[in-house]
Structures are given as structure tokens and as C-alpha cells.
Image (tube, rainbow, N blue to C red):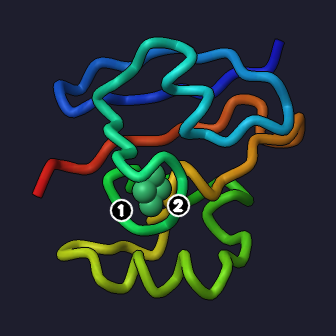
């Protein structure tokens, strides 16, 4: 089963399996990683699902939608590899993707 590596705010890395087609947000919540709050449930209104994607991954360079770009632009510390987990759909090609949860802020 494909998986992602998730480094949490304590620096611990978790192995999270997913079903292709799931969002990263759903995969993390299905794995019990509630540290990613995702308060709006994927409605693009909260940005509490912000993650940093491994800059070596194609997922860090895939174009995001206009609304995702607006929400990320409103973050206090966006990076080039910032993504919203609710908008990042996990495909088989992303097997092994590494993400990091940013500091809360
Ligand atoms: S869960 Fe709210 S913007 Fe992603």
C-alpha cells in the first residue's frame, strides 16, 4: 500500500498508508494524526491543514488551484513548498512522499 512519511511538530516521523485518490488530510486523519487540525474539513477557509512538502517531490511543484494559492498567500510563513493537505490528492506516483507539519502559528 502506498504511504507518506509525516514529520510532526515534535520531530517524530510517522508512516501513513493511504488509498490513492484520498486527500492528504483524509489520509492523516484516517491514521489518527489529528495534530493536523483541518478545522474547515476541506472547504478552503481555514488553512489549518498547512503542510510543507518535500521540495524534491513533484507534489511541491504541482500547480495549485487559485483558491489554494490565495489561502496559502495569507499564511504568516508560507514557503515555496507549502501546500494545503485538504487539496493535495494522493496518487500512486506520490508513494513515499515526505511532508512536515509547520509550527503552529
Ligand atoms: S482544511 Fe481548511 S483549508 Fe484545508
- Expressed as whole percent of the image width and height from the top left, the position of residue 64 reads 66, 75
Taking the spot 63% from the left edge, 58% from the top edge, the residue there is: 87
How crowded is the residue under tag 2: few (<14 C-alpha within 10 Å), some, or many (20+)? few
Task: Name the foreground residue: 35 vs 8.
Answer: 35
Is the residue 30 above or below the residue 48 in the image?
above
- Expressed as whole percent of the image width and height from the top left, the position of residue 25 reads 54, 39
Can the viewer see residue 52?
no
Mark 1 and mark 2 in contact (Cβ < 8 Å)?
no
Taking the spot 40% from the left edge, 50% from the top edge, the residue there is: 49
- Horizontal placement of 47 versus 77: left or right? right
Element marked by disc 1: loop
Does mark 2 have its CB less than 8 Å from ligand 1? yes
Q: How many marks?
A: 2
Taking the spot 40% from the left edge, 76% from the top edge, the residue there is: 72
Is the residue 37 above or below the residue 28 in the image?
below
- Horizontal placement of 100 versus 104: left or right? right
Is the residue 94 above or below the residue 60 in the image?
above
The tag on residue 43 is 2
Residue under pointer 1: 47
- Expressed as whole percent of the image width and height from the top left, the position of residue 51 reads 41, 51
Element marked by disc 2: loop
Quadrant assignment, res 18: top right
For the residues labelled 2 and 1, the Cα–Cα distance comes to 10 Å
Does mark 1 have its CB less than 8 Å from ligand 1? yes
Taking the spot 54% from the left edge, 53% from the top edge, the residue there is: 42
Q: Quadrant of ligand 1?
A: bottom left
Amino acid at each position: 500500500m502506498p504511504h507518506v512519511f509525516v514529520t510532526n511538530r515534535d520531530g517524530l516521523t510517522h508512516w501513513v498508508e493511504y488509498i490513492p485518490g484520498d486527500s492528504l488530510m483524509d489520509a492523516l486523519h484516517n491514521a489518527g494524526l489529528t495534530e493536523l487540525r483541518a478545522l474547515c474539513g476541506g472547504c478552503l477557509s481555514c488553512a489549518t491543514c498547512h503542510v510543507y512538502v518535500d521540495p524534491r517531490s513533484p507534489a511541491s511543484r504541482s500547480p495549485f488551484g487559485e483558491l489554494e494559492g490565495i489561502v496559502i498567500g495569507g499564511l504568516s510563513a508560507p514557503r515555496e513548498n507549502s501546500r494545503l493537505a485538504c487539496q493535495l490528492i494522493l496518487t500512486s506516483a506520490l508513494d513515499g512522499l515526505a511532508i512536515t507539519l509547520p509550527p503552529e502559528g
